[in-house]
Amino acid sequence: MAAQLGRRLRKGATSGAVVAAAVAALAASQAPEMIPPPTDNAGGDRAIGTGDATTPPSDGSATGDSPYFTELPPLNTPNKPGAPTHLPVITGPAEAGIPASVLAAYKRAEASVRSTDPGCNLPWQLLAGIGKVESGQARGGGVDANGRTLSPILGPALNGVGFANISDTDGGAYDGDKIHDRAVGPMQFIPSTWATWGQDANGDGKKDPNNIYDAAQAAGLYLCANDRNLALKADLDRAVLSYNRSTEYLNTVLSWFEYYKRGTHQVPDGTGVLPVDRSDDRGRGNRPASTPPYSPLPTTPAPTTSAPKPVTPDPKPSETGVPPKTPPATTDPGKTPTNPPTKPTVPPTKPTVPPTTNPTVPPAARVARLTTVATGALTATTGNAFGKAPTVAALDASGAPVTGVSIKFEIVGSTDARFAGARTTATVTTGSSGLAASPALQAGQKVGPFTVRATVVNRTLAAEFTATVTARQADTLTRLDGDAALAATTGTGFTQQLRVKATDKGALAPGVLVTGVVVTSKTATDASTEGPYFKGEAGATARTRVFTTDADGLITLAPGDLLAGDKAGTFFLKLTAPGGGSTFVELTVAAPEPTPEPSTPEPTPSTSDAPTDSPEATSSPSPSA
């Protein structure tokens, strides 16, 4: 009677009182510590809040309140850990069997979520309970080596007829329906919810709701939303109800949750028990039985003789194993029959137990540590490539390298350094030694430290490197056109060309940032407030400028690049470079020479007023008479 109560509980066919009774029976028979179900709205399959005043997500639930399987677990205790795992996958204890890949996905999701949100206390058995109710553990574990279902698992169109009315949100990308949304995959996410919560837990670069690893991790994160602590009864109820807002759904999931907590065992993929009854009541009495993806294994061998025809109740077969043509004579139940029935003569055949296959665990899920590989200091001068690349090692729990792990390298901080291709992120896959090195790292023109972070894709495991960009250096600055001062008059420009060569340890130093400052003396530390200034500063009188040495290590000031200003006197152009190189160039500003004023001519005196220096004229002798 108890076993029958635990099977095929349907929405509408069984009252909330029966649901409560079944859960209570489970709690009494096998799970005394089980959290009792809520009592509000226990008589019907309606959306309830269990006292929760928190506003639900905008889409109402993860599944859009799609239909689900309503069968409850059997009331007998499942196998304890350590019991044989090669059990026939049919009825009874086989209900505690979870397909290998599906079980690995649940446990992987629990570990991942606990590493990022330990306060949620997510148990993998809760994911198993939801997976059982939503899809029968991915249709009995019908998944490939990467965890993807062999065929899409789709719920009915959410067209408002018996379900929520949700118009298409994904263009049919996930559910193939461009009119209405459908719940998708082993955890039955509707596309709009998956768009927010979807994960790539198996590291294949895709967020696939039909992948059990992706779907299980997404479900775990969804259940832990809003800072829930699933160790608390109220938060546990809220989490399950956020998945599907139904009292019966809550009770069914919690029943499987408690059942799995009592013990489970792994079964091969594709051999899990398939549930039959769904909450939408389709096919009751007239739906074809679902066909399992395998041949069920018998618990005892069956005779090969034909089945007996119905007769007057007498369960005993005849001596030959063939039903009698006429009913046998009635015997006194207190007497021993003279001709006891014999067992079938066909020898029993031993059932063939399918081999247990280990699921393929994604490489990312096997990584326990991500460590930096000592490569020395990561330094480069402005504009140059770093001599070494950040390198990490992906290791499993035993310290062995893990191959095929996707590692994301990311440049973090205020810097213009970039990976090859002017990128700030790059994804690299670990090789056979478990190592992954970032692409070539190129320094920009901004000096200072920044961080390169390496992260296992879709995991929180990370390692960080500090990289530093330093300015290019020159320990010597040499003037190439002599030591003579540059001269100009106020209001004009210096007409001489100035060339200075930068070297470092005797070698030319291209790309060095040389700072030029106009000062009043060689001991002055601040720029002058008057005198010469640099040309081309949009009208501003700038007395400081930074130059970059060319490929030959030279800086050049062409005639007219430096203006004299309006203040006459002696000034200096101080040139300095990182690395200690420096030199001074004397600047002489002179006032322009005054223009001579024109002289006023003196008046010439008359002959009567002043004697003349010129000899007097001699009159010609008169002709003699």
Image (cartoon, helix red, strand yellow):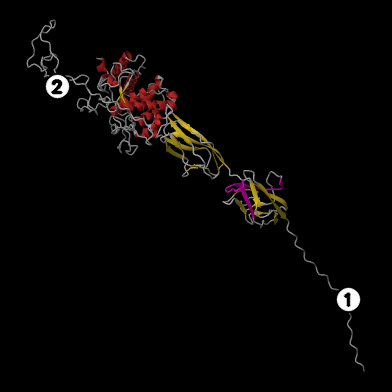
Query: With 565 as the anchor, is 121 left or right in this view?
Result: left
Location of residue 340 by image quarter: top left
Q: Does the magenta stretch include residue 512?
A: yes
Tell which of 297 and 345 is nearer to you: 345
Callout 1, which amino acid? Answer: Asp
Q: What stretch is highlighted in magenta?
A: 498-522
Task: Give the residue at x 71% y 52%.
Answer: 567
**How far, Cα to Cα, is label 2 from label 1?**
170 Å
The spot of residue 215 in percent (x, y) is: 35, 30
The spot of residue 110 in percent (x, y) is: 39, 25
**Mark 1 secondary-structure assignment:** loop
Question: Farthest residue in the top direction?
Answer: 334
Look at mark 2 in the image and give the residue it sits on: 304
User: From the image, which quarter does the C terminus lie in?
Assistant: bottom right
Look at mark 1 in the image and give the residue it sits on: 613
User: What is the count of numbered marks?
Assistant: 2
Task: Give the residue at x 90% y 92%.
Answer: 623
